[in-house]
């Protein structure tokens, strides 16, 4: 019997209309766990580097995390992997909610989609019965509306549905896949789903998910839940409220937005407004939030309330995720009422709540700069808020200028020309970043921005405080029960941290170790399907490198210790990097935007990057060395890289290595 | 005489719709204990319809062999509920509280265990306190007499539907848990 996982994938070829069940090799679980890990392996094996994202040969993989649907609190993630139409590199996005557990109960770990359907279809997976159904009547429908219609059609209220909106159908480069209060938003994967002609996937399952060592696993899950309760009762002291609790974070629960509104940039990632948050604003926003939010809601088997049922004047209600709350608000230099309004519309159209506001702000800036004119934007309204709605409608339909803006800031700037490129100032590897414009380069964040394979810092930053504590006592109190650190050395980072020591604090060596730790935790989460909000993202989370091996082992029966788990995380991380390198990602691409920080330190930055590459076992071009690949059991990657000239012959391990 | 009545008080306003109650209930009642999870085997379900802001945890009560006439609709705080949304019965009109394999009814047993638990597992796992366990002592006249006739009718119906063997096997399984 397979434990935690089902051991079966659904393989669906939409060009041929075929559906196959495929048993999976348990050795792959031992090497990669599941989720992102096995998705990446599948993309490496099955999608050659020359395959275009919008090609029938591109795969779109929906995978439940290894622990999804078990008793492990917050283990509910679905990881979608494919190649991005925007970055042309690999894309993965992680979705919470209820879909991944339902898929496991139906008896599958992954749904692997290839080919393209000649007409719009949806999938109905009902335990052993799997159908490709006509979806022509769903064309143009909103993502949540589609889910409602399908639930009625299959006559099962318990069916879990993920769907694309108009944006996905029209292959917008930042179209999302929506599922109630959750979504897989980044990298344009909703556009890939639209390109394949698949409007939605509905799933219903009534089978058991088994675990290997029930009593032990139950105890460990109880411990996680107790720790969550402890953390809820004991918020971290001396940090802003938004950073004090668990969750991803619980945006809709909190009213105090001082940290986001003053740390993040407004408009097209332009201005920081350190004086924006006042008592008056807080009182005003509180009224809006309390009026609009009807209930705080959660994902499967998780007590944290990161989402909300939100009242919407046009839609009735929609379901807010954690942070779309402020992205539109701040990009439009507007307020919360506007933000909550347009975010609902964005969800029905199925667009990414991070990228979209920035594209809209970019469009407004180009108009104000005279680069886009009334000819490009006939009837362009007067206020920024109305302009945002105007542009959103154009983009999701790819109408007029919307057809260009639908490709994202990087591509749109180059298509428009006339100096528009200068307004593309917040992308890395062609992908919009969170709008942060800061004073002085921070070495930890520099490396995360430069090298993260997610190309999206919100998914790789983590559980370190964002500022030094004021007093020695505060520091000591913080580290006293900091059990999550890999070892006590990491506590020195907090203990020795003084104000105004950037960019030379922490040391390059410590920076490498901290970044490596943060990243490792995300790679574990994204393979086993635990929510980052209970693990890699917040300060002092319930899941950490010391309890994960026991939890995974008790659930799956795998023989696993800390070193073993670290090695799997490293294997997955390196394979994903190699997937991108094989598609042409270069060292020159690993660059945060010029104006990310006012004060830059080119020499230090270059040293940081070089040292980090070395630390990771990569060569000076950022390519994992043959030795690194060999140690991780990825010799097949090294062989291909040598054949393609990505790794040079002289970098081979000498034949005489054995006598060393 | 006095009798302790065990109750789960439900505060629908506090329900965050996470269904942890379903997960832990199904695991507790799995054989061996905690060896699997499956909300469809749970004796508590969250009736949910997020876009209508409806979240109602309901724990399984008596089995009924035919559906009732009550198809009333209640409007509470501007939200429309079906009568069934609050009903605890394992009833042929719906899939709730029926074992997905055998179709036999499921009923909440307040997590009877040896030694006894402090509270049912669903209550323990609902750290948002939508579920609160309560023991009420109440005066009852006499131990209610069993009604063999009704049980017989129910069993006959089950035998008709599933055959004697399935019913016997299930009874013996239920007897063990």
Image (cartoon, coloured by chain):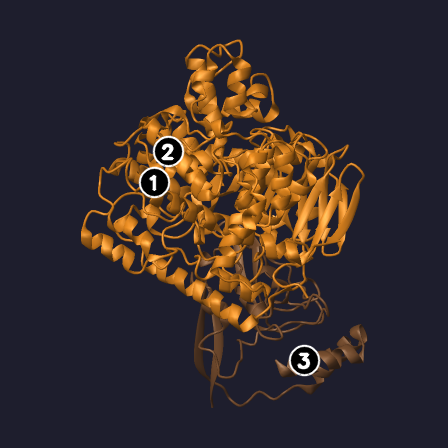
Tell me what hue chain A is rendered in.
orange
Instruction: Determine which of the numbered discs, if any, sits on residue B173 in the image.
Output: 3
> How far apart are labels 2 and 3 at the CA level?
67 Å
The answer to whether mark 2 and mark 1 are in CB contact below 8 A is yes
Q: Is residue A332 left or right of residue B86?
A: left
Badge 3 element = helix
Spot occupied by residue A322 in the image (x, y as percentages of width and height): 45, 44
Q: Residue at x 28, y 56 (%)?
A: A479
The answer to whether mark 3 and mark 1 are in CB contact below 8 A is no
Nearest to the observer: residue A554 or residue A388: A554
Badge 2 element = helix
Instruction: Determine which of the numbered discs, if any, sits on residue A508 in the image.
Output: 1
> Which chain is represented by brown in the image?
B
- The residue that label 2 is drawn on is A607
Q: Chain of mark 3?
A: B
Q: Residue at x 66, y 29 (%)?
A: A52
Q: Chain of mark 2?
A: A
Spot occupied by residue A282 in the image (x, y as percentages of width and height): 30, 39
> How far apart are labels 3 and 1 at the CA level?
62 Å
Q: Residue at x 67, y 30 (%)?
A: A50
Nearest to the observer: residue A111 or residue A158: A111
Spot occupied by residue A58 in the image (x, y as percentages of width and height): 68, 35
Nearest to the observer: residue A332 or residue A621: A621
The image quarter in which residue A119 lies: top right
Would you place residue A594 above or below residue A168 in this image? above
Nearest to the observer: residue A59 or residue B152: A59
Q: Residue at x 55, y 89 (%)?
A: B143
- Number of numbered discs overlaid on the protein picture: 3
Whichever of labels 2 and 1 marks the residue nearer the N terminus, that label is 1
Is the same chain shared between marks 2 and 3? no
Spot occupied by residue A170 in the image (x, y as percentages of width and height): 64, 28
Residue A619 makes an appearance in the image: yes
């Amino acid at each position: 019997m397979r434990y935690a996982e089902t051991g079966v994938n659904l393989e669906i070829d939409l060009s041929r209309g075929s559906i196959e069940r495929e048993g999976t090799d348990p050795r792959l679980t031992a090497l990669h766990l599941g989720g992102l890990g096995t998705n990446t392996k599948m993309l490496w094996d099955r999608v050659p580097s020359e395959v275009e994202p919008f090609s029938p040969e591109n795969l779109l993989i929906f995978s439940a995390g290894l622990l999804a649907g078990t008793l492990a609190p917050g283990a509910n993630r679905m990881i979608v992997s494919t190649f991005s139409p925007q970055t042309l590199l690999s894309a993965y996005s992680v979705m919470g909610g209820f879909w991944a557990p339902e898929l496991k109960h139906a008896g599958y770990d992954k749904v692997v989609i290839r080919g393209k359907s000649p007409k719009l279809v949806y999938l109905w997976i009902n335990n052993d019965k799997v159908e490709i159904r006509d979806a022509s009547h769903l064309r143009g429908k909103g993502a949540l509306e589609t889910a409602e219609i399908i639930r009625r059609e299959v006559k099962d209220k318990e069916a879990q549905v993920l769907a694309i909106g108009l944006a996905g159908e029209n292959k917008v480069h930042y179209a999302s896949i929506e599922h109630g209060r959750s979504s897989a938003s980044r990298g344009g994967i909703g556009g890939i789903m639209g390109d394949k002609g698949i409007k939605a996937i509905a799933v219903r399952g009534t089978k058991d998910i088994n675990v290997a060592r029930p009593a032990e696993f139950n105890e460990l899950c109880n411990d996680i839940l107790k720790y969550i309760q402890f953390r809820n009762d004991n918020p971290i002291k001396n940090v802003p409220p938004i950073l004090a609790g668990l969750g991803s974070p619980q945006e809709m629960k909190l009213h105090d937005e001082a940290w986001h509104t003053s740390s993040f940039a407004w408009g097209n990632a332009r201005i920081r407004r350190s004086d924006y948050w006042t008592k008056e604003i807080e009182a005003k926003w509180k009224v809006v939030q309390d009026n609009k939010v009807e209930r705080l809601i959660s994902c499967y088997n998780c007590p944290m309330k990161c989402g909300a049922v939100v009242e919407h004047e046009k839609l009735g209600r929609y379901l807010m995720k954690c942070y779309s709350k402020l992205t539109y608000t701040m990009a439009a230099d507007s307020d919360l009422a506007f933000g909550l309004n347009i975010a609902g519309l964005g969800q029905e159209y199925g667009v990414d709540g991070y990228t979209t506001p920035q594209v809209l702000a970019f469009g407004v800036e180009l108009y104000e700069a005279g680069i886009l004119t009334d000819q490009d934007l006939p009837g362009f309204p007067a206020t920024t808020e109305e302009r945002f709605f105007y542009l959103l409608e154009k983009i999701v339909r790819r109408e007029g200028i919307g057809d260009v803006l639908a490709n994202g800031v990087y591509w749109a700037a180059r298509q428009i020309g006339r100096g528009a490129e200068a307004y593309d100032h917040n992308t890395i590897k062609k992908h919009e970043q969170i709008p942060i414009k800061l004073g002085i380069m921070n070495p930890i964040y520099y490396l995360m921005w430069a090298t993260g394979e997610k190309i999206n810092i919100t998914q790789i930053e983590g559980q370190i405080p964002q500022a030094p504590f004021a007093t020695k006592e505060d520091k000591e109190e913080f580290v006293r029960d900091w059990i999550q650190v890999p070892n006590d050395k990491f506590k020195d980072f907090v203990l020795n941290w003084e104000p105004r020591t950037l960019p030379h604090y922490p040391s390059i060596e410590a920076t490498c170790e901290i970044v490596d730790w943060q990243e490792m935790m995300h790679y574990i989460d994204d393979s086993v399907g635990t929510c980052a909000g209970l693990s890699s993202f917040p300060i002092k989370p319930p899941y950490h490198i010391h309890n994960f091996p026991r939890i995974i082992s008790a659930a799956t029966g795998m023989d696993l210790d800390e070193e073993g788990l670290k090695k799997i995380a490293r294997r997955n991380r390196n394979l994903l990097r190699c997937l991108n390198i094989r598609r042409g990602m270069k060292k020159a691409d690993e660059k945060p935007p010029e104006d990310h920080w006012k004060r830059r330190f080119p020499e230090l930055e270059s040293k940081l990057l070089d040292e980090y590459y070395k630390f990771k076992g990569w060569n000076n071009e950022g390519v994992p060395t043959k030795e690194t690949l060999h140690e991780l059991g990825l010799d097949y990657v090294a062989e291909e890289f040598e054949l393609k000239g990505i790794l040079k012959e002289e970098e081979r391990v000498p034949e005489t290595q054995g006598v060393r | 005489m006095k009798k302790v009545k065990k109750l789960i008080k439900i505060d629908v306003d506090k329900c965050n719709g996470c269904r942890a109650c379903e997960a832990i209930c199904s695991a507790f009642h799995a054989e061996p204990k905690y060896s699997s999870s499956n909300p469809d085997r749970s004796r508590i379900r969250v009736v949910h319809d997020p876009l209508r802001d409806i979240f109602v945890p309901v724990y399984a009560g008596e089995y009924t062999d035919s559906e009732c006439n009550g198809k009333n609709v209640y409007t509470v705080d501007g939200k429309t509920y079906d009568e069934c949304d609050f009903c605890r019965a394992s009833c042929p009109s719906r899939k709730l509280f029926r074992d997905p394999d055998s179709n036999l009814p499921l009923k909440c047993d307040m997590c009877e265990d040896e030694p006894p638990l402090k509270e049912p597992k669903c209550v323990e796992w609902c750290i948002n306190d939508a579920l609160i366990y309560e023991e009420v002592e109440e005066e009852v006249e006499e131990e209610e007499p069993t009604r063999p006739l009704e049980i017989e009718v129910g069993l006959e119906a089950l035998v008709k539907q599933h055959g004697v063997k399935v019913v016997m096997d299930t009874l013996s399984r239920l007897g063990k848990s």
